[in-house]
Image (tube, helix red, strand yellow):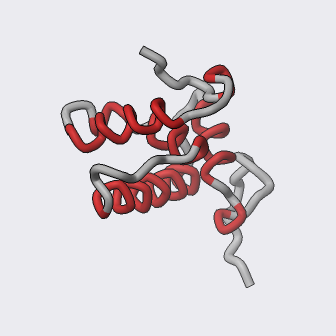
Amino acid sequence: MHASMGGNNMTSSTPSQLTPAKALEIAKNCEDGVPPAVTAVLERAISELWQRIQAQPSTYVMHKEEFIVFNYYRSRFANVATAQQAVARFWNNFRGDSTDINGAYTS
């Protein structure tokens, strides 16, 4: 049994069904602030990703979906060498069209 979220009209998904990709889509389109359930999904995703990067600081290569989440929080890691190296490894290993990465920095 799931608790009702009341007048929440952000999405028809329950928080347990909200993926990081869907949460990012919602967050990028929010004009009145990001709903708490969306923030919770994104915070969990970035926390888990950052733990993976820290566990393998010189070798972990993010996949595209991870990078998109990381890029959303990139300012949080602006002066962190491990993060900068992880971004460089992503781009050095990325095979595809960079326009597929919504909002990603390519410089």
Name the spot of residue 60 as percent of width and height, x first.
40, 53
Q: Residue at x 19, y 32 (%)?
A: 79
Q: Residue furthest top?
A: 107
60 or 16, which lies in front?
A: 60
Q: Is residue 58 left or right of residue 97?
A: left
Name the spot of residue 102 as percent of width and height, x first.
62, 26
User: Where, by quadrant of the figure, is residue 89 drawn?
Assistant: top left
Q: Is residue 4 left or right of residue 95?
A: right
Check the picture and name the quadrant holding the N terminus.
Answer: bottom right
Name the spot of residue 92 as percent of width and height, x first.
46, 31
User: Where, by quadrant of the figure, is residue 76 drawn?
Assistant: top left
Check the picture and name the quadrant holding the C terminus.
Answer: top left
Q: Residue furthest right?
A: 12
Name the spot of residue 71 as percent of width and height, x first.
46, 34
Q: Residue at x 28, y 53 (%)?
A: 57
Q: Is residue 39 left or right of residue 2?
A: left
